[in-house]
Amino acid sequence: IVDKDTSTGKAMYCSGPAGIGGPYLPFPRGNYTVDYYLKTSDNTLSDNIAAIYITSAGGGRVYIRKEIKGTDFKERGKYQKISLFHRSKMFDSHLVFWLLYQ
């Protein structure tokens, strides 16, 4: 959708279950922080509205997962940075960063 609040003027909008993942690229050992910029129209919801996580390319190993509630947002309709940290102790053939709307 068109969203003037983003650097590109575009955003992904979900009103029901949907997800996106990537980049399916190799990552050497190291520390990684993945930043997601998300917003919600209702920051009073105490239910999970989304989840962010990092997995192996086949999805067989979930390294970290974070559930996001509407109440995690300070303001409705404003982007907020939500981050995940992953310390890779070995070469990972491929990592996938996921965003799942519930």
Image (tube, rainbow, N blue to C red):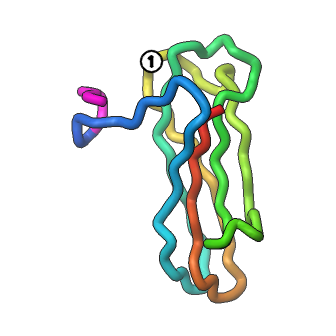
Q: Position of residue 45 (x, y in %)?
A: 69, 15
- The answer to which image quadrant residue 95 occupies is bottom right
Q: Amino acid at mark 1?
A: Gly
Residue at left offset 44%, top offset 22%: 78
Q: Is residue 47 left or right of residue 3?
A: right
Q: Main secondary structure of the magenta part?
A: loop
Q: Quadrant of the N terminus?
A: top left
- The answer to which image quadrant residue 29 occupies is bottom right
Q: Residues within 10 Å of mark 1 (few under 14, many from 20)?
A: some
In this rendering, the answer to whether 43 lies above or below 94 is above
Classify mark 1: helix, strand or loop.
Answer: loop
Q: What is the magenta range?
A: 1-6
Q: Quadrant of the C terminus?
A: top right
- The answer to which image quadrant residue 30 occupies is bottom right
Residue at left offset 69%, top offset 87%: 90
* Residue receiving disc 1: 77
